[in-house]
Amino acid sequence: LESLPASATHEVIVHGDANPTNLLAAQRQPWLAIDGKPMVGDPAYDPAPLVLQLGSPLAQRRPGRAVRDHFEMAAELLEQPADRLLAWSVARSVESALWYASMGEVGEGSLELRTAAMLARQLGV
């Protein structure tokens, strides 16, 4: 969480809570992002929840391969390195696990740590 933001090539305004429930079909534009938690940061920060929740790659028979494929597709669309998107996903999963633990929700925190470990394997770490 220290080296990843510091190694960003540029910063943008990120949504902060980009997930499928915060994207709506709209008439004036194809999509409307709601309930943002805007921050300035690495453009690779935001896609993790969308990549992991759309198409349910974690629920696949071979989730590691499915997750990697989803991140590769997102990387191409977003013109960001897939490994950077994955690295942010690991960081965000660990952060989420710590939040769950602080709330006494050990089961959810454990699930997040397992997700972080699987994502880290896709990075080769």
Image (cartoon, rainbow, N blue to C red):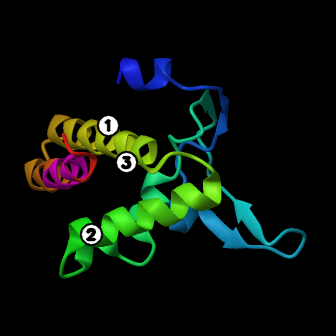
Earlier in the chain: of badge 3 and badge 1, it is: 3
| Picture residue at 63% right of the left edge, 36% below the top | 38
Q: With respect to residue 58, does 72 lie above or below?
A: above
How far across and how far down the image is residue 8, in percent? 54, 26
| Picture residue at 56% right of the left edge, 32% below the top | 42
Q: Which residues are magenta?
A: 114-121
How far across and how far down the image is residue 19, in percent? 51, 60
Q: With respect to residue 71, does 79 lie above or below?
A: above
Query: In the shown orientation, is residue 91 left or right of residue 27?
Result: left
Earlier in the chain: of badge 3 and badge 2, it is: 2
How far across and how far down the image is residue 119, in percent? 25, 52
Find disc 1 in the rendering and name its residue.
91
Mark 1: few/some/many CA within 10 Å (<14, 14-19, 20+): some
Find disc 3 in the rendering and name its residue.
86
Secondary structure of the residue carrying tag 3 is helix
User: The residue under label 1 is which amino acid type?
Assistant: Ala
Q: Report the Cα–Cα distance between label 3 and label 2.
A: 13 Å
Find disc 2 in the rendering and name its residue.
65
User: The residue under label 2 is which amino acid type?
Assistant: Arg
Quarter holding the N terminus is top left
